[in-house]
Amino acid sequence: MEFSRPDAENAVKYLDGGVNMTVREIVKAYLVEHRWDGLCSTDIECGCDCDEICALSRNFSDCVPARKVKATAEQAEEYGVNEGDVIYVEVKK
């Protein structure tokens, strides 16, 4: 089941409609509904886009909603990436 950003209403409809959905589809619909970009785990410093949630079939139960950003110099050093690389950072309340 594919949801694009403008398709958030469709995601909510599926959530409210009681359609049989996998956990991945439910998580993806929730992220799309709230206009978040994906998930990240601060424990192991990884992140993924909504379309690739847990692509490696790893446990994502400790992941949190994330925004996709380009790494600043400070983030690049912290995460071991290059400045300007795309990273996923936790959505702060």
Image (spheres, rainbow, N blue to C red):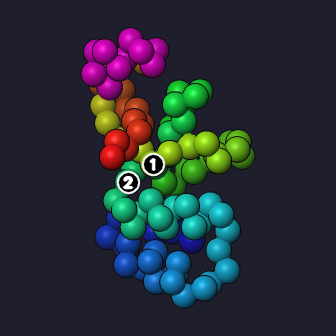
The kind of secondary structure the magenta stretch mainly shows is helix
Q: Which mark is residue 9?
A: none
Return the x and y of residue 60 as percentages of the image width and height.
Answer: 64, 46
At 56% across and 43% down in the image, what residue appears? 63
Q: Residue 33 location, x and y as percent?
A: 39, 67
Quadrant of the rendered structure where residue 88 is?
top left
Q: Position of residue 77 (x, y in %)?
A: 38, 12
Quick check: 77 left or right of 24?
left
Q: Amino acid at mark 2?
A: Trp
Which residue is farthest front?
A: 93
37 or 64: nearer the eye? 64
Which residue in the structure is indicated by mark 2?
Answer: 36
Residue 66 shown in magenta? no
Which residue is located at x 32 percent, y 25 percent?
Answer: 71
Which secondary structure, mark 1? strand
Q: Which residue is mark 1?
A: 65
The secondary structure type at the circle numbered 2 is loop
The picture quadrant where one finds residue 8 is bottom left
Asked whether the viewer can see residue 75, the reply is yes
Amino acid at dot 1: Pro
Against 87, residue 50 (above or below) is below
Sequence-first tag of 1 and 2: 2
Check disc 1: other Cα within 10 Å, few if <14, some if 14-19, many if 20+.
many
Q: Quadrant of the N terminus?
A: bottom right
Q: CA distance from mark 1 to mark 2?
A: 6 Å
Q: The magenta stretch spans which residues? A: 71-80
